[in-house]
Image (tube, coloured by chain):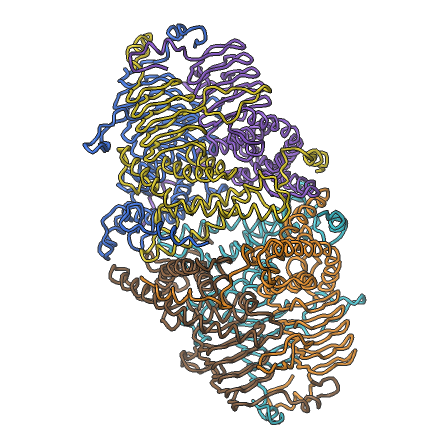
Chain colours: A brown, B cyan, C orange, D purple, E yellow, F blue
Amino acid sequence: MNFSETVKSLSSLNDSSFYHYGVESIPFPSVMELKEIVEICRSLLFPGYFGKSIIDKDALLYHVGANVDRLYEKVAKQILAGLAFTSEDCGCSECRQMLNEAAHEKSAAFIESLPQLRELLETDVVAHYRNDPAAHNAGEVILCYPGLRAICSHRLAHRFYELDVPLIPRIISEMAHGETCIDIHPAAQIGHSFTIDHGTGVVIGATAILGHNVTLYQGVTLGARNFPQEEDGSLVKGIARHPILGNGVVVYANATILGRVRIGDDAVIGGNLWITHDVEAGAKMFFKKKVLAEVDGALFI
Amino acid sequence: MNFSETVKSLSSLNDSSFYHYGVESIPFPSVMELKEIVEICRSLLFPGYFGKSIIDKDALLYHVGANVDRLYEKVAKQILAGLAFTSEDCGCSECRQMLNEAAHEKSAAFIESLPQLRELLETDVVAHYRNDPAAHNAGEVILCYPGLRAICSHRLAHRFYELDVPLIPRIISEMAHGETCIDIHPAAQIGHSFTIDHGTGVVIGATAILGHNVTLYQGVTLGARNFPQEEDGSLVKGIARHPILGNGVVVYANATILGRVRIGDDAVIGGNLWITHDVEAGAKMFFKKKVLAEVDGALFI
Amino acid sequence: MNFSETVKSLSSLNDSSFYHYGVESIPFPSVMELKEIVEICRSLLFPGYFGKSIIDKDALLYHVGANVDRLYEKVAKQILAGLAFTSEDCGCSECRQMLNEAAHEKSAAFIESLPQLRELLETDVVAHYRNDPAAHNAGEVILCYPGLRAICSHRLAHRFYELDVPLIPRIISEMAHGETCIDIHPAAQIGHSFTIDHGTGVVIGATAILGHNVTLYQGVTLGARNFPQEEDGSLVKGIARHPILGNGVVVYANATILGRVRIGDDAVIGGNLWITHDVEAGAKMFFKKKVLAEVDGALFI
Amino acid sequence: MNFSETVKSLSSLNDSSFYHYGVESIPFPSVMELKEIVEICRSLLFPGYFGKSIIDKDALLYHVGANVDRLYEKVAKQILAGLAFTSEDCGCSECRQMLNEAAHEKSAAFIESLPQLRELLETDVVAHYRNDPAAHNAGEVILCYPGLRAICSHRLAHRFYELDVPLIPRIISEMAHGETCIDIHPAAQIGHSFTIDHGTGVVIGATAILGHNVTLYQGVTLGARNFPQEEDGSLVKGIARHPILGNGVVVYANATILGRVRIGDDAVIGGNLWITHDVEAGAKMFFKKKVLAEVDGALFI
Amino acid sequence: MNFSETVKSLSSLNDSSFYHYGVESIPFPSVMELKEIVEICRSLLFPGYFGKSIIDKDALLYHVGANVDRLYEKVAKQILAGLAFTSEDCGCSECRQMLNEAAHEKSAAFIESLPQLRELLETDVVAHYRNDPAAHNAGEVILCYPGLRAICSHRLAHRFYELDVPLIPRIISEMAHGETCIDIHPAAQIGHSFTIDHGTGVVIGATAILGHNVTLYQGVTLGARNFPQEEDGSLVKGIARHPILGNGVVVYANATILGRVRIGDDAVIGGNLWITHDVEAGAKMFFKKKVLAEVDGALFI
Amino acid sequence: MNFSETVKSLSSLNDSSFYHYGVESIPFPSVMELKEIVEICRSLLFPGYFGKSIIDKDALLYHVGANVDRLYEKVAKQILAGLAFTSEDCGCSECRQMLNEAAHEKSAAFIESLPQLRELLETDVVAHYRNDPAAHNAGEVILCYPGLRAICSHRLAHRFYELDVPLIPRIISEMAHGETCIDIHPAAQIGHSFTIDHGTGVVIGATAILGHNVTLYQGVTLGARNFPQEEDGSLVKGIARHPILGNGVVVYANATILGRVRIGDDAVIGGNLWITHDVEAGAKMFFKKKVLAEVDGALFI
């Protein structure tokens, strides 16, 4: 077959933003490498659960040290790729060295924050165990629970976000989204002891802020309500537009909370609710039985 | 252990439709191959973003040409497998040649439509970028957004559907469904500049028709409402049973639109709504605050 | 870079439950191995659809026999890993032999139940085909439908659950959850001829009981309503807390049924409903049009 | 970089025999596939030593049957590729079907001769064990000895040669050559109970004929002596030009036997000898001490 | 095709030594695993040259420690497989535990001898560098020289041999033989500062003993001369039958030294010689020019 | 097990030349990458025989162009690694850029010489076909003959040698040595129409020079004879010490030619000969029958 017309058409891409030339000789961030980075982090955060499954106590230090060393260059390389994707790098050796140094600094800062991330994640494990009557032990939570998996990825992605690394946070978030059906924007701020049960369909927007001890069930959306437009019709970027949840808030399955609303400490939002205004601390909101009972013949709850 | 009884029982399958003998010497469509085909298509549609990440401008023609050539036989082979699965191929050399020629014609037609698919997908990228305040640039959309990924797979699957290729469209759809939690039937007709934000849980049925510039948020179902039954109790196949959305329609998170209803141009359907009748062009439908305020004490929105 | 402080901090884990030492020389259950086990089971349950795609009728017995033989040791090894994870194995040769014998017995029992599982799954295939107007044939259901995939994994996981195997059932469930966005707890009891259409977001809790011929659409939750707390604030474990669905029940998209309620035979639950009380047999529950019509101007259904 | 001249030059290949277009849609024989075919054969010839290492006695029949079934199509496909490489196949469906039928017949004939090949190879194992004082048991010979490995590959390659399959025999020979440094032309005829010790550098030419119970040590060449030329200077093809070794012949390390000479039964050829004439049955040929002693001062043997 | 006769014939193997049942639930030594073990050893012996290629000085301890920890269980598992292959293990838990303990003891002893093996190998590297005018530096020798590669494998295999581990030493030797065409029996005893140049075709027999600073060129055989037979015609096993080379001996290409002869310190054996008697210390043996000059017209050296 | 002493001992490597720290952030040359580079070159030199086996004539340009583009960066990266291994790179950005530019220049020069290398290799293919009575066609030579494989690798390695690239040439040579048992030093100069038959054990030294139309059989050594020593006992490096073979020379199996001798045009060297002096053009040297006949009783040739 001769496809020369098709080939010519598909190759006519000069100056198109849909064709990425790449900064010279710096390849794109690699999804495969980022998967491995997340796996190494998991094995550092929960040794024996991920990575090598039998670790002699005498050898733990070695494995941790070797993984940290592997991580350092791997992370730096991906950060460099992320920086190059968005920077105005001219390809000269000065620009290149500057990017490379920035990448290594950010990589070191990321690694140095792992002990703190582990402390946070330990509170998340405990929270999951306490909140799920079906959980047998902490190990089961660490190994099997998609909620914990998503939170772990989020905390890593959020750390890259805080370090002003482009692209990488989003790729890690989407990897977790694909695996767990839980979609947390890497910019979202989340306190300790966070639980997501089942998790399918959870969406947490970029400017959402969650306190400590928050619990979300499947299908919960913490989304934006208004999308103010620029004059050209595109949406205004960068506005705080997602909810703020206080400490101890519980949101049951498929509830939707939209806009920059505040849900007070220890409030409970019932399943399938649609919330677009503030909720007082301690409020317990559910569908009212009586209203539902009015529904003709067929409907009662 | 002697499992001879179990083995015998599991092997007693003659004439069962749950045991597939396969058309002689034509293997089944391969999920692995179809994954690779989709990946090659992605690298043709968005060069530099997928596949080889650094492409010299002088070499783009070569890479496109080589990928098109690889694609031609790969696609023909999978189409042949799909045709053999459903055809009444008797295994003779005439039948075989006929199937093979059909497969190659369809493969060529598929490839020749790629430039047109790219034009469509470019409108989708622009739409996503404009509709998401958190998007930094078109590249981030192409690389990371599950909505765009699902739409890209859909446009490829739909093209195979239009070419009357059996099985392959569905397998591609389900691959995208597994990756993105977005479930678009390959038969669904979708206009240009389509956006799906977050996307988890979106379901678009087989006979749905969407205009241009449509935007859907997570959890939106465009489904069937009635399932007329055959006399034997099974459902009647092939009836138009899913919604028609006009140009510019926006459907917010978790709304459900069921049946062959028409949603007029530029209508906006609020989150969590349940729509089973036509909606006028330009209508903006949301839960009414007052009704919700009636709910006893605990519930307001 | 010198990360000795970080390494030291990450290695200071003695006596932490977040560090798994493993029972001496018995590795952890392997997700890779369990994936392969599920794939072998699928190829035994639906030969020709999974595994080797062209099987000569004369050779079916051999392939089945060889796969059963491979399965026996593979399954026993994973069960042993699961038992070791939770047992109080002291590492002595007696404990070890006892665990090993138990693992082999359970593996044999699992394999011997495969013919029965296939009978069940054949009813599920038929049910999916009859319930989806877009399905062309049983083969397409077996190959492509995420609902069937999830049910197949559930029936395997549930069998391991019945055999008192720890961890393995949950890992298999979460593998299916990740692939299909359908989250069925392995303990859930489900009758024959079960259909899940589209499936994204379906959640079925641990103590749920479903009769025969049940049909669920996407986003349906069969969840818990009350979570009685222990004195220490953690949730009481092991209480029957999920719904019981009779034979022939249909639940449409995004409906939520919570608590130990009974949905009578042949009841139909409309989409987006929120059910927390019993429903009579034969009842057909939908949103009442009139109530919705009251909603101001913008909302009608 | 712009390499357009180089690319143009490297692509200017029309009508060159150094550029292989391939018979339309029949790929080349695959070295990977042939490796796997040889591995499957090894696991059929010596079950438990190659392939699955623990085989329950009750399951042996199943594994053998499943492997034979896999082998049939795999072998047929490679034979077809070999036939297509050399045939004057015009690409029409009749030619194609004829080639395909021939390939399947040859594949079946190959498989049906495996039991006989195993009988031969069992005599080779026994011979190796008896001839090597360092061998501990038959299993060690089967698992580790390069001589046996090379002979096994040769017997398989020779069977393909007898079936008039082009290319495949040579590829299998060269695979064994690369692994063991033993170079046996697939056309060479070799009796039972054959031993090659160490083996590095052994060369056995295409028209060589070896009786039963022959033993060769490393570096032995059974080669051609004269290469009669065609008028154009190229060598005449197809002449019997390699040695004939009787039963029980032993040839020690690095001896070279050239031309269509006959080495009588039970003759022993000493190391490093250069033989270009017939040798009587029972002769024992070694370097004569006296001659060597003549060598001045420095040389004695 | 129906191959039931062939399958039946190939499965009729009861009580044949050509069918390995395996000790129950202990798999065979794995060539793949042994390859990885040798690679890990290489990375421990020459860090930075094999395994991870960039190692921060601060991280070397971690990588070494982690590799030693990985090695311990891996080696123990392969030793166990080797022991089970030859032991009279009855499969009871006592036998099993005894084998397992022995395997772990031998693994520990192996690992503890690695520092000493490295000292030896350092002398080999220096010797290769000094003996090859084409070598640029020690690093090139470590990375590229097949002689060093073969010696490294031999020193590892020999250590397993000293620890009375069955099978494993031979498999490691044959792996090196296949890679380098150098065939050193694992039982051979070899002093420090050993050089093999080019190496193709070198054969060193089981009972050979080599002093320090020995240099061998390609094609050298240190073999057996007499093979005394048992009454049944098989060869007597276990006799010292290979040469003893003193310190500083050099043997040039393709020389053959056979039998339990002694080559004195610093002797030099010329290429292509055939030696079957002792050689005095300091002797320099070459083909005598005059003798060769006698050869009629055509031959002189 | 606690191996802290062993770990400490294996880690105590500061300032040892047996521990390679690597030039900062430039990894070692990768054997895997070099294998792929050689494979891509083979597919450029003999399209359709290596790499993609079915290439449409219309698509050849694309495949060649795409492979050339892939090759450019891959080769540059390995050259950079080779340069860094030996250079006195201080790690600063100027040094780094200089190395990088040199690497890209050498990569471009390498690629631009491929058309010329193909012309040479075509003469080698023709020579092999003419010299082997068992060869059926040029394709068989290209696909299967280890001699051609080794020569192809040599011509690539020699090109890197000419470009003053360190390490890479040697690694490519040793890869070919391991695969074919043919050991050609990358510095050796070899004319067109070169044949190596069988090839096992062939050794060609660094300073050897071979004319056109040379033919070598297995086991031929073109080696060094004298190794002048430095005062410290190590060998003097860089002296011309290997033979020069004229045009049309044939050397039969296992002959050894040592030292800087000249073998005149069209000379024929018989098997197993040992040559250390010049040979006149046209001379035909073989063992003299008469001399051999003198050997007592047992030996005649």
The image quarter containing residue C189 is bottom right
Q: Quadrant of residue C231?
A: bottom right
Residue D17 falls in which quadrant of the image? top left
Residue C62 in the image: above or below residue F258: below
Pick the front one: B45 or D164:
D164
Q: Nearer the viewer, residue B164 or D34?
A: D34
Q: Nearer the viewer, residue C182 or C244?
A: C244
**Residue D39 location (% of width, % of height):** 57, 38
- The reply to whether residue C108 is visible in this rendering is yes
**Residue F108 placement, left or right of D83:** left
| Residue B49 in sight from this viewpoint | no
Extreme-left residue of the structure: F231
Where residue C250 appears, as percent x and y from the top left, is: 72, 73
B120 on left or right of F19: right
Count numbered badges in the picture.
0
Q: Position of residue A33 (x, y in %)?
A: 43, 59
Give me the residue at 44% from left, 43% from top: E38
Left/right of residue A70 with respect to residue A261 in the rendered view = left
Percent across and percent down for residue E122 are 32, 41
Q: Nearer the viewer, residue A286 or E202?
A: E202
On screen, residue A292 above or below D116: below
Decide: is A139 above or below D180: below
Q: Quadrant of the C terminus of chain D?
A: top left
